[in-house]
Image (cartoon, helix red, strand yellow):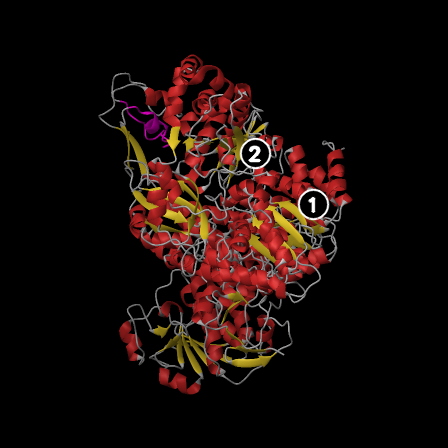
Amino acid sequence: MPVITIDHQELEVAPGTTVLQAARRLGIEIPALCHRDECSANTSCMCCVVKVAGAKSLLPSCATVVTDGMVVESETEEVYEARRTALELLLSDHVGDCIAPCMMYCPPNMDISQMLRHIARGEFDRALAVVKEDIALPAVLGRVCNAPCEAACRRREAGGAVSICLLKRFVADVDLALENPYLPEKTPADGKRVAVVGSGPAGLSAAYYIARAGHECVVYEREAVLGGGLRGTFAPEVLPDSVLDGEIAVIERLGVRFECGQALGEQLDLDGLCDRFDAVLLAVGPVERGVIEGWGLKADSKGIKIDPATYQASRAQVFAVGGALRPLKFAVRSVAAGKVVAACIDQFVTGRPIQAPDLGFNTKVGKLSIEQLQDFLLRARAEDRSEPVEGLVGGYTADEARAEAERCMHCECSAVADCLLRKYSGLYSADAKRFKGEFGRPIRLQTGHPKIFFEPGKCIACGICVQIANAAGEALGLTFIGRGFQVRVDVPLGGSIAEGLMKAGEACAKACPTGALDLKSET
Amino acid sequence: MSEVDLGFVDESIERLGRKQEAAIPILQAIQDHYRYLPDDALRRLTEKTEISASTLEGIASFYDMFRRKPVGQYIVRICHGTACHVKGSPLVEEAFRRSLDIRKGTDTAPDGRFTIEGVACMGCCTLAPAVQIESSTFGHVTPGNVDNVLHDFLLHPDKGAPGAEALEGSPRSGDGAATDGLVPEIRVGLGSCCMVKGSNSLYTELKQTVQRLKAPVEVKAVGCVGMCHRTPMIEVLEPNGRSVFYDDVTIAHVEALVWNHFRPESMWRRLGHHASRLIDRFLVEETAAAQVERHALDIRDPSVSAFLDKQKHVVTEHFGNANPMDLTEYQRRGGFFALRKCLAELTPDSVIEEVLASGLRGRGGAGFPTGRKWRLVADSKAERKYVICNGDEGDPGAFMDRMLLESFPYRIIEGMAIAAVAVGAHEAVFYIRHEYPLAVQRVREAIRRCQAMGLIGPEGMLGHDYGLTLSIMEGAGAFVCGEETALIASVEGKRGMPRLRPPYPAQSGLWGQPTLVNNVETLAAVPWVIRNGAEKFASIGTEKSKGTKVFALAGKVMRGGLIEVPMGLTIREIVEEIGGGVMPGRTFKAVQIGGPSGGCVPASMQHITVDFEALAEVGAIMGSGGLVVLDDTDCMVDVARYFLQFTQDQSCGKCTFCRVGTRRMLDILNRICAGEGKPADLDELEFLARQVKAGSLCGLGMTAPNPIVTTLRYFRDEYEAHLQGRCPAGKCTDLIEYRVTDQCIGCTICAQQCPVDAIPLTPYRRHVIDTTLCTRCDVCRQACPENAIEVTDRCR
């Protein structure tokens, strides 16, 4: 039985075992996009390369059979660089957005596409729940947000951006009008206590998520009324007090305690707060250097100095967010920051390493022309953007909202959760924009198959589906068409994907390492 | 209802079979018949054969020769081989497009008459730039004479170069003359290049003239003469053994030529010497006689002897004086002696020992020791084994294999047979690219004759009961099929996609059986090695590179052609002495060795020797032997881009590094050539070159960066000039401008010839080029009789 050494670990394997199989048995993760155990080696993606002692070039571990005494390195800098380059090359020819541009540009990264999907189906409550995952004050923001999401919406070129902001406001208003507006599930209380100083958009947002994480949360407000910068800045017809109060009431119902007339440096002092609470969040809005230093904290030219990775101020127990760090023009940025800092605080008080949440690895296609959008437009309502009949103040009616939400093309990738290209691009810190150039495959979307979508622009030409279709005995099946950079996988003889995959459609979609073939989901 | 009559499809299926391996031959037959692959024909195939739709579409879209759409009445094939490229084939294609009104992105003229098609290399490098319209080939085409070419073709659209009738008609010319060389002969080269230049009709004319005049001389068709720069060429061997070459001969010269050398016997008797001279004056038209004198080249002529003296003919033994198809002559000159020896005297093991001892290494590129490869196959235990002759010579700028197959088919068959005996194979396949119809035709006929004469066949060889089945598989146009695992996939009727080695074909090749894949030239050397002994072969060449190597010498060199030299000659000896250097007034800049997998060696390194090791050291490779000479008018960035364009187009598309990596390198080079490069691009190119080399699956990808790596190493200054918006050689059209100088006499020729009317007609005054209209096609510069048009940096 041949013995192999991978990264200094020895293993005896059965004859015919590949290096990839051996590595997996040793618990060494090797990225392999084009490999499936039930298929013969495609040796296409070349992300699984390893350094075999004595070999001139790097070898794909998926097709390299172990020979006795073989010595393999899987973690050298050379191997890492080759894998990252392979991923970057694949990304340079991969036409897709992992997440939709609107979500990408939404500061709190709300899952707008999912919200719109629910609205289109009339599931306004579910839509609101999606919104509240990321936005604590949707009814407020629905009135005062500058809506960077709409600037990024691909329908801008095709009848105007989807009216995302108004639709969010619509579901928030529907919710607030209920006797018992939506309250998210709370993590069971753990006895940890967090003080939030300031009840502006950042403080309110943070309090919402801190309370949701199961911690006791007290918000101190210097003024007599809550809301900080949200109060009194906007004309009453733009942001009526009732809306702000309504959303604050929800936060209160979640268990957050509010105390007004409590100013830091006057009624409150930082040492005292630190004694009484496990963590303190300063969401006090713009503040002068002298004042900051008076609190015993470090300042920089714009405000309280923090570690940008953790939001911690110079005193570990103290966090700061929002306008207290630097002037912020838009409330949505404060709301977004409140959510992030709440996550950091949650990690801190529960003794975990602090890691501000981010979206992970994402590719972006960039601008697409109307022609390139054609197929994607087919799954959206064709009409141009509609304004509410009642006017901006009145907002959408339910029917209007549903119709408008149907205009969404759902640009995100349905395979975002299980795409191997995305997963390993993140792990290997691949730069999706490193290599620029034309795409080898058409930017298309085939929706004619009852079970699956086919998006050739996302295909990495690995050949797994070609093998699966062939093994399933498809009459037409799939094949490689063309050669070189232009090679693409498609149904032979001009057939549609529905004709090509009469039997193996779902199997192919499940095996596809990217979102080129993916199941039509019911979410 | 089907629009095409599918009767032919059914017929082809009956003739070629229903199995997967018949897929490519059937598609080739369909393509030849309909001139494209109609969808209905493919559907019919899926119904009537075991070949799946997936396989058919995969193949039909993989190989260059297959077309899925109807084509025009005539196909114009523009060769984009290396030699053609550096001599202006892109401008020629542009001129054809303009002349035929074929817009970018389309390939057929609006009237449906002409379809234009770029081809990787037609292997007529000494005729560069070469263009083939249907079966007529035109050499030395320029943007200025495109209209003449089309006109010429349309005068005789069905003329063409007619294959090998001349040879077929006289399969045994020279037969019976046991005293080789003493019978006076007029030898006419009938290689593809010579035939393009009319040697076929010359041959017919000579035959008729000799017959008519009853001249005491044999007219003999021979294979490639090698001196392609002087075709059509004939050699006259006088009774006294003196040999005289004539170059650029036309039919008009024929009679005078025969008269000059061979006074018809009857006249000698009747008139005597003096009188014959009188008649001479009457019969021979003066101009023709003068021309004959002008074209005569004594073998002692310095240019001829320089071309020939350094050469050493092993695989091209008897070059220029053997009729390729004459089996009797082949045998008379020692043909099949080696095979007989292997069958009668040697054991397979001792044959391998002999090949090992000779030091023969694979001539296809990588230089793997041939004996060792044979040993691996011989040692593999299996019921069936195969030998494949790799004649898929796809490198642009290389035509050695074509010449060998056309000129020495029996020698290669013998080499194949010896290899088969040595490794224990009973089936041998010639894989020859379809772009070499004459080679296919001659090898097919040679196999037929060997079988008809009972020399080699499934029942036995040369009276021994070792059977060998020989067959031919025509490639369908894919450079990557030169890679042995891709080639095997292609023989099996699949897309030519390489796979990871090991397992090597020696263990698991064709149909999973041990398979020996050897290049044409390697096999051609084998009979010589066995006949003359390993020691004699090993005495030629250098310590590690034994024997000789055939090179296709082309590009900017005075005497291009096909040469065979001992390993270890210097680049200088080859380029300057054999090739006669570059054109007068030009400077030798570099030589591109090894095609797309090779590199550019600068003139400053012309002292290095041409052998496997020395070339590898400077970043080039021996490759299959294309040797393209470049001069100061060649832009090295453009040359690098040219090769990368080729490899990325020819990549099978399987592995990421080759499929996307070469393309991204090309993107960078395109930006640089357009003047949009950034300094960081050069680092990125080098980075990608390293990655593609290290991470590609097969030899194509691993060597694809070589032309970039070597040009970056030796000509970095040219890259940097491009970054600053200048093309020092004046080649990159985005960076140059045409200007009329003071020397203009106002003759209006340029204005008349400009295809885009960018030069207003101003008789007797200096002309001016409108640079906004100018497409930089170079027509005006070539047409100007006063050299008054210059290429300058473009003002940006």
Identified by mark 1, the residue type is: Gly
Q: Position of residue B157 (x, y in %)?
A: 56, 23
Task: Find the magenta span and give its range.
Answer: B767-785
In the rendered image, residue B770 lying in the magenta stretch gets the answer: yes
Query: Which secondary structure lies at badge 2?
Result: loop
Mark 1 = which residue? B454
User: Where is B613 relative to A295, above or below?
Assistant: above
Quadrant containing the N terminus of chain B in the rendered view? top right
Q: Position of residue A442 (x, y in %)?
A: 56, 47
Q: Could you tell which of marks 2 and 1 lies nearer the N-terminus? A: 2
Q: Position of residue B689 (x, y in %)?
A: 42, 57
Tag 1, which chain? B
| Residue B591 appears left or right of A381 | left
In the rendered image, residue B80 lying in the magenta stretch gets the answer: no
Identified by mark 2, the residue type is: Gly
Quadrant containing the C terminus of chain B in the rendered view? top left
Mark 2 = which residue? B174
Q: Position of residue A140 (x, y in %)?
A: 49, 61
Q: Residues within 10 Å of mark 2 (few under 14, many from 20)?
A: many
